[in-house]
């Protein structure tokens, strides 16, 4: 053990260790040369991973750019004439109902116009609504009364959580009333025996995770926006995130739900038990419904045992084919401790470096990088498994180079090269984002094809007269989920024409999904037909009509 | 390693090793005496677990008893007069449609009466229908045509898989037509990179698991009836089984589904990808709908990496409180490798022994037994974790005694003490079965309370004039899921009056579920109100009416 401990600690230098400059082969316990160098940098940390989260505020890198009104970006949209116009009487009703001034932001009043702006625009500055009233209910009863009133008066509403969405789902289009859930943020209980957490929909994901972390558990969802997003919004969009690979989908881990239907009916299905086969599992319909059927007010979530040992490694890989081999090998060898397998292409890492500066984790450039995370109950065991895995993928030349984080700070640093992508690539002005599922064998091919297409059209280049900066791909390889991103200097109709419907047709041919985890919102509403057949869409519309016959819930979006 | 290997192999004697009679303490590498003895019996097997499955055929232990007609057991049921009577013209249509004689069992014809019996009765001989026509479609198109015709002609139907259900859900009540799915049993594809399995609903669970086992994966569901039950039936009843603790619920692992609606519409949602957020997840409604909304014809299931190392241990425990402590400790220490934590009470093990004879795994009697299984990728690591866990629970006197399986045969033997319960306790004539979820702290209390109540009523005793043999509890402790069973010499109205609604009221008070995993079927239809409020039931009925306005799908049951 002493030998290993020395090897592990001998390389600490305050930054992630570049494995090809590490300890001499002689010290490497007889392992093959290259492998031993990599393995020697490997260690386990007893700390849970905490990471640099992409800023979701309006002070981000693109703050200078003001969003266009959604109605200008989407001139085909017309306000549904069935909906009433907001009147002072309506506002007076809500003020009387919610009882405190701060719970109602009245945009009709000119003084409050600035206060209402953050609710009218998304963090990417892509969508901008014209809402003039924000309501902040403090209880399920208030949500129920608000919706009943709106349903009777034909006032359209948009439920809003942390407003971290990527498809415009939580931003009004016209003058819909925003129902902001931030005041409903109580954690009600946590059962330390079973791991079931009862909490309000307006709780911030990171706060919820911290609550269970202190009790030895982990919230079964993690994503870059965790510091701002609400668990209710996560469930409403069926967020997938970084560790779906390990903890599964919200369809499996949401045990109970309270939701308010458009007519004010409270659907109370707050089961705290893992198994309850008594009738149709209606709450499932609300998971991923993006606020179009009702508003989720409370949740019961099954949390998993938190792993005390966490390792993170980042590799450089010569080809996408080798990245697939690395993934298959990681599943085989790391199996129950594998908690993330993320892919980043060379372009994404180059752009992050260009924006942020600093030292890159690996010396050379590679066309692909993978970040893997293991989470287990025994750091020595996890270390051994990881070491064996690294030996194999190095000696078989599946990976070309790599670093392994040596402590919690380095874990955070390595993750920041993955999680920083979203924010950094917006640096030049904007991003066209596609969040897609494609069978793994063909997943990355779409990046090549889209890049070639934009180049051929003369839209991609290094100078300002080219709208497109570059095309890149990254995402959750463990879930066949690619984020295809086109970094642009400005949003441009010519670029859009080249991209759509091309991208959707490309995905349809591979029977992929045009929205893996971001949802439909406004951005994908018109493209659902590329992933769902007419029968399915018809059946979905039937459900929408059943629950929301007046169509007041989050109109103009979804299906 | 040599020392450990010797210890592991030194006790092989063809049966499970009783830990308190093992190797001398001197050989035990300095561990505390009792612990070392236990730990020394521990080993890992490279074989996957295969187990003794409870017989689900009519040649079982209770075969001599004939089932009463369901209409006699439930005299309150009346045939829905909206449904047509079966005519020779209907039969002729189906014969022409299905094209081969064996696909239609025509009970109107006296010669076929015996052939139809297995479809009219459940394996527990509790439910007996009066169906006179069994159809065995061979394709989705045939299912669609059958249902469209039945819907038009107002012929009620009962979808039937392996007929291994426990609540009468797959048995006709009156003359409903049985649609048996056994001919649709093709495994269409398996993606070795992603683990997604595409198969027909009529595939037998064990066959499906075997198929993926050969490719290094495990089907994410396992249960005693795996040799007979169909995956379509598993999904229709949202089966939970033995390893939900590890692989989660079917709501998370069913990726895609094809189902036929009552009007013949084919709902094709055969996504093979883990993430697809494009609209309402309608397939979720069919998971656990017990064939009341349509018939599932195909599935895509996410399979997990199969663990090469499997360990099974069985403990004797002095109290339910200590069983809870053992569970908490197992979650903490075995965490990612824990794949089952099963509870069996002393009564259940005594009865199994009484029926089957043979040598019991432990020498002494204990009020509780726990069976734990670990599944991991590295047998040495798993061994160490298990050893450490055993050290702790032995030295802290959480468990009193235990055995650890030494090879695949012993794994099977230990599991048989858990899985044999269902069949053995039917030995005296029958079983009243309650499959309930109760918060863990109070879970076992219901067994005491029910036993006391039956004793007070003079119904429980050792002689034939007492209908009740004994009251026992066992189940999936990891899921707060108890099987409360009352072994009886005969089904008896007096017993039923003592049990119901008492049991349901007891569960309602603890906010438990009256059906954790078996479903509602006919048995629990009238009791759903103990686990669901009126609003929820109303919303469920709305869904039923939406999909099956004529009510032809599996009538008289569910909600």
Image: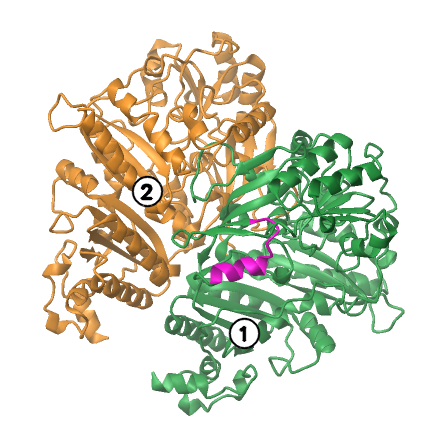
Chain colours: A orange, B green
Among the 4 quarters of the image, the one containing residue A134:
top left
Give the residue drawn at x 56%, y 74%: B315
- Determine whether A264 is above or below B415 in the image: above
The chain under label 2 reads: A
Name the foreground residue: B137 vs A252. Answer: B137
Please state the horizontal and vertical placement of residue A400, each as a whole percent of the image: 18, 56
Can residue A36 be seen here? The reply is yes
Tag shown at residue A322? none
- Which residue is label 1 attached to? B411
Residue that protrudes farthest toward the right in the picture: B465
- Which residue is label 2 attached to? A443
For the stretch drawn in magenta, the main secondary structure is helix
Give the residue drawn at x 41%, y 30%: A161
Magenta span of residues: B200-213
Please state the horizontal and vertical placement of residue A336, each as a whole percent of the image: 40, 60
- Determine whether B3 is above or below B166 in the image: below
Q: Secondary structure at mark 1?
A: helix
Looking at the rendered structure, whether the residues under marks 1 and 2 are on a common chain is answered as no
Please state the horizontal and vertical placement of residue A313, each as a whole percent of the image: 24, 55
Name the foreground residue: A284 vs A441. Answer: A441
Q: Secondary structure at mark 2?
A: loop
- Determine whether B396 is above or below B31 in the image: above
């Amino acid at each position: 053990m002493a030998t290993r401990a020395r090897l592990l600690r001998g390389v600490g230098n305050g930054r992630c260790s570049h494995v090809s400059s590490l300890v001499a082969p002689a010290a490497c316990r007889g392992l093959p040369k290259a492998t031993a160098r990599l393995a020697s940098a490997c260690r386990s940390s007893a700390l849970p991973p905490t990471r640099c989260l992409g800023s979701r505020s309006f002070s981000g890198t693109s703050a200078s750019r003001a969003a266009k009104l959604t109605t200008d970006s989407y001139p085909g949209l017309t306000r549904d004439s069935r909906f009433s116009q907001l009147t002072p009487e309506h506002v007076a009703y809500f003020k009387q109902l919610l009882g405190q001034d701060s719970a109602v932001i009245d945009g009709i009043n000119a003084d409050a116009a600035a206060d209402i702006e953050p609710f009218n625009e998304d963090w990417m500055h892509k969508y901008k609504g014209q809402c003039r009233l924000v309501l902040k209910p403090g209880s399920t009863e208030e949500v129920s009364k608000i919706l009943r009133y709106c349903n009777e008066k034909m006032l359209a509403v948009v439920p809003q959580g942390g407003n971290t969405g990527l498809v415009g789902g939580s931003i009004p289009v016209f003058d819909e009333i925003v129902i902001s859930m931030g005041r409903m943020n109580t954690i009600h209980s946590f059962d330390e025996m079973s791991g079931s957490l009862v909490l309000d929909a307006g709780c911030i994901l990171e706060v919820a995770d911290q609550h269970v972390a202190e009790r030895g558990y982990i919230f079964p969802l993690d994503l870059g926006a965790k510091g701002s997003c609400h668990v209710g919004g996560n469930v409403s969009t069926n967020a997938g995130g970084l560790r779906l690979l390990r903890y599964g989908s919200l369809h499996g881990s949401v045990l109970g739900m309270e939701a308010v239907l458009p007519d004010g009916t409270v659907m109370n299905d707050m089961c705290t038990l893992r198994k309850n086969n008594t009738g149709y599992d209606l709450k499932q319909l609300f998971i991923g419904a993006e606020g179009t059927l009702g508003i989720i007010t409370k949740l019961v979530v099954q949390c998993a045992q938190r792993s005390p040992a966490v390792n993170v490694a980042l590799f450089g890989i010569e080809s996408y084919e080798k990245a697939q081999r690395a993934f298959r090998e990681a599943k085989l060898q790391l199996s129950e401790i594998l908690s993330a397998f993320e892919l980043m292409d060379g372009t994404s890492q180059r752009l992050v470096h260009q924006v942020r500066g600093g030292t890159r984790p690996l010396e050379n450039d590679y066309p692909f990088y993978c970040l893997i995370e293991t989470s287990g109950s025994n750091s020595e065991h996890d270390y051994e498994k990881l070491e064996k895995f690294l030996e194999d993928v190095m000696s078989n030349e599946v990976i070309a180079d790599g670093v392994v984080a040596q402590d919690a700070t380095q874990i955070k640093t390595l993750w920041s090269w993955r999680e920083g992508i979203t924010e950094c690539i917006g640096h030049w002005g904007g991003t066209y984002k596609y969040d897609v599922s494609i069978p793994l064998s063909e997943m990355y091919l779409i990046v090549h094809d889209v890049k070639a297409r934009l180049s051929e059209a003369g839209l991609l280049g290094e100078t300002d007269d080219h709208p497109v900066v570059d095309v890149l791909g990254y995402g959750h390889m463990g879930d066949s989920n690619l984020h295809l991103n086109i970094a642009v200097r400005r949003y441009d109709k010519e670029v859009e024409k080249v991209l759509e419907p091309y991208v959707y047709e490309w995905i349809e041919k591979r029977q992929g999904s045009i929205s893996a985890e971001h949802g439909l919102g406004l951005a994908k509403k018109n493209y659902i037909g590329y992933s769902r057949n007419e029968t399915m869409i018809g059946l979905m519309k039937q459900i929408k009509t059943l629950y929301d016959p007046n169509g007041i819930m989050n109109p103009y979006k979804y299906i």
